[in-house]
Amino acid sequence: MKRAIPVLVLTAVGLVPLWRYEPSTAASDDQVSAPARTVTPAPSASSSGGSGSSALVIEGSVVNTEKGHVQVEVTFEGDAISSVRMLQQPDHPQTTAAVPRLVEETLQAQSADIDTVSGATITSEGYKESLQAALDARDA
């Protein structure tokens, strides 16, 4: 009985931080007010060489993830995606390794319907969302 009271008190004291714990969200308060998932197209046509065709460059939306901001820039040659470049990405080794695979899959699929890279799931999801926003902006 003498041990039961201190055990109960210490258990209650240990649980107080758990009750007060508020998990962090993907964005802080100032980021929540900003339209994080809005398409912000920045189309700019530039002539490519002497072929007479033009390239259309569109930026996808900035996607706030737990790891950081993700944003892509897509270059279209006619109807095809000719290149994808990361404008913003989390500074994380797994992200750095995943980006070339994501770009390669995008160029092969010619859409945002690509597989998530294992180990970089959060970045992959943000990449696909920003890519889809750029594709939607092109079609708009």
Image (cartoon, rainbow, N blue to C red):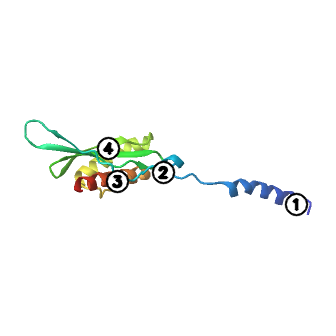
Check disc 2 and give the amino acid type: Ser
In this picture, residue 21 sits left or right of residue 93: right
Question: Which class describes the residues within 10 Å of circle 1: few (<14), some (14-19), or many (20+)?
Answer: few
Question: Which class describes the residues within 10 Å of circle 4: few (<14), some (14-19), or many (20+)?
Answer: some
Q: Earlier in the sequence, mark 2 or mark 1?
A: 1
Which label is found at residue 100?
Answer: 4
Question: Which class describes the residues within 10 Å of circle 2: few (<14), some (14-19), or many (20+)?
Answer: few
Q: Label 4 vs label 1: CA separation?
A: 59 Å
Q: Label 2 vs label 3: CA separation?
A: 22 Å
Q: Earlier in the sequence, mark 1 or mark 3?
A: 1
Report the residue marked by disc 3. 128
Quadrant of the snapshot with the C terminus: bottom left
Check disc 4 and give the amino acid type: Pro
Task: Residue at 27% x, 53% y: name it.
Answer: 137
State the SS at label 2: helix
Report the residue marked by disc 1. 5
Circles 2 and 3: CB atoms closer than 8 Å: no
Circles 4 and 2: CB atoms closer than 8 Å: no
Residue 99 on image: x %, y %: 35, 44
Residue sticking out furthest to the top: 49
Residue 44 on image: x %, y %: 22, 42
Task: Residue at 75% x, 54% y: name it.
Answer: 14
Residue 92 on image: x %, y %: 45, 41
Q: Label 4 vs label 2: CA separation?
A: 32 Å
